[in-house]
Amino acid sequence: GMNLKQIVKDELNRSRFEHTERVVDTALILAKRFGADPVKAEQAALLHDICKCWSEEKLKEHIVRGDYPNDLLQYNKELWHAPVGAYVVQKDLGIVDKEVLDAICYHTSGRPHMTLLDKVIFVADYMEPARRFPGVEEVRQLAESDLDRALLKSLDNTLLFLIQKGMTVYPLTLSARNNMVEQVH
Ligand code: DGI
Ligand code: FE
Ligand code: FE
Ligand code: FE
């Protein structure tokens, strides 16, 4: 059958593919630690950034013609590759698993009531070993024992970063954060 890893490699540049390989490794560690399905975790991690190297124009064209949230184009273009990636892996690669598709779709924004797989992919993407975000070390520490607190900290860090830069916040990210505050308190 087709080799998903080769397809991903062909779609991405070298540094983005190496990031993807580190997210796969990290997602497998987290899946094992917190009881997520390792096959789904590996697949979602491998595919999560499949559209990351598309141009802004290509992403925008795709979103205009497709069935996406109305407000998506009004927010940061960094958000776009995630839902487009979920669509593309379903349509072009035949991935049908809803949990895998959702984990890809929400890996950048987050969402309220994230599934275990959503959390594993989000946190793995945030804390893979080459990440150098301020506060990432605390996320890695939390992820040793508490996936929810690691997720909340990574959402908080992202929101603080966006606000500090004067950037808009996608409402789904704020909802994701509010929901995790309720979950962990
Ligand atoms: O694709 P990656 O670089 O691996 O990581 P990602 O898909 O998590 O993209 C994260 C970037 O998106 C992050 O640096 C901040 C930016 N971003 C812009 N607006 C928002 C946003 N991230 C979230 N969660 N919410 C936003 O509103
Ligand atoms: Fe991404
Ligand atoms: Fe992320
Ligand atoms: Fe990523």
Image (cartoon, rainbow, N blue to C red):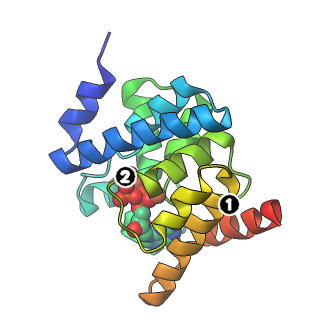
Q: Assign the C terminus to one quadrant of the image.
A: bottom right
Residue 121, x across and y down, in percent: 52, 45
Q: Which residue is mark 2?
A: 129
Dot 1: within a 10 Å radius of its alpha carbon, few (fewer than 14), some, or many (20 or more) residues? some
Quick one: label 1 or label 2, which is nearer the N terminus?
Answer: 2
Query: In whole angstroms, how far apart are the C-alphas of marks 1 and 2?
Result: 19 Å
User: What residue did someone put label 1 on?
Assistant: 149
Left or right position of 102 against 35: left
Q: Amino acid at mark 2?
A: Pro
Amino acid identity at mark 1 = Arg
Residue at image position (53%, 73%) is 157
Where residue 88 sits in the image (x, y, percent)?
Answer: 39, 38
Image quadrant of residue 43?
top left
Q: Residue 184 location in percent, x, y?
A: 79, 62
Q: Residue at x 68, y 50 (%)?
A: 114
Q: Where is 118 relative to 137, above or below?
A: above
Image quadrant in which the N terminus is located:
top left
Would residue 139 appear left or right of 46 to someone viewing this image?
A: right
Q: Name the element at disc 2.
A: loop
Q: Is 135 drawn above or below residue 85 in the view shown?
A: below
Residue extending farthest to the top is 1
User: From this viewpoint, is residue 67 visible?
Assistant: no
The reply to whether residue 6 is in sight is yes
